[in-house]
Amino acid sequence: MSIEIVPLAEADIPGAVDCLQRAFSDDPYFQWVFNEPSKFNIERNAASLASHFRYAINCDDPLFVARVSRAASEVKTDHEIKLPAGSIVGVSWWCSPREVSVPQTWSVWAQDWLLSFRQLMNNILFWGRGGLNASRYWVYKQVQRETQKEIWKDPRGYYFCNVLCVSSAVRGMGVGKRLMDIVMDKADAEEMPCYLESSKGYPNVLIYEKMGFELAKEIECVEGGDVCRLYCMLRQPRSKT
Ligand SMILES: CC(C)(COP(=O)(O)OP(=O)(O)OC[C@H]1O[C@@H](n2cnc3c(N)ncnc32)[C@H](O)[C@@H]1OP(=O)(O)O)[C@@H](O)C(=O)NCCC(=O)NCCS
């Protein structure tokens, strides 16, 4: 099976949303922030993720998908029959670094507003946030802000890996690494550091350590007696020589 890593296109959005929803269904942060399964609305969640992907495209964020590219003439194995050409089997969405001293650009500011507007429309169309526990989300954002302030020492900013997922059918085959390498190689060439957060300690911390990240801090988001632990990891640029 052949898998290509390509920038996310509008046509890939439904596949990328589906891949993300499946990969994160057992994610500790996801379960903490959508803490009442009976209220979870998968269509509302899909609309929100699609709005975020459009935001990322418009902001020119590094946003890639792993897409099955096998030609129709190739021999099919059982594995491939389940994954037709064009299937999205992985997503990585990064935020580009922003210097601390440089203010937000007008275009990003406008996209922030457009995203808020789309989310408002989603709230109206789906009668609410689809089970998202908003107070938990804001607890997370606050803890995240404080943590980044504490551990982001480089004034040039960081490539921030916001989302990474690979379909369970193709895990352990190097797809996640390829989705990361495409941005980490750019970061290395620019001598820029990278950052990520994972709520799954095992095996993710091990996986990211293999990619050059180091655990910088473990943080806890607490709300309503429930705790969500996050592993914050930093990666310094590597020289190719
Ligand atoms: C995390 C995730 C993206 C990794 O993707 P993947 O395609 O399985 O990873 P790769 O096959 O590219 O493996 C990358 C490295 O980690 C290693 N690795 C993969 N799975 C591992 C495991 N379970 N335990 C230890 N090491 C592992 C690989 O051997 C490889 O190391 P190498 O380059 O030295 O050989 C994938 O497991 C996933 O989508 N998980 C669910 C969603 C999630 O947790 N996303 C991350 C949120 S922060």
Image (cartoon, rainbow, N blue to C red):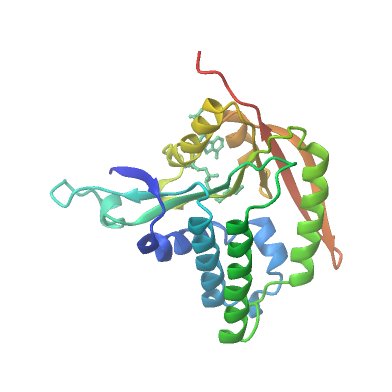
Q: How many marks?
A: 0
What residue is rendered at 57% in x and 62% in y? 25
Left or right for 126, reference 90: right
Give percent across and percent down for residue 233: 69, 37
Whether residue 21 is visible to the viewer of this picture, yes or no, is no
- Which residue is farthest front? 106
Residue 189 locus on image (x, y percent): 52, 26
Depth check: 11 or 26 in front?
11
Q: Position of residue 34 (x, y in %)?
A: 68, 69
For the N terminus, the quadrant is: top left
Judge from the rendering whether residue 165 lies leftward or rightward of residue 233; answer left or right: left
Q: Is residue 223 visible?
A: yes
Q: Residue furthest left?
A: 73
The x and y percentages for residue 158 are 65, 38
Q: Residue at x 44, y 59 (%)?
A: 16
On screen, residue 156 versus residue 12, left or right, reads right
Q: Is residue 83 above or below residue 41?
A: above
Q: Is residue 168 above or below residue 195?
A: below
* Residue 121: quarter of image: bottom right
- Image check: 216 left or right of 81? right
Q: Residue furthest right?
A: 225
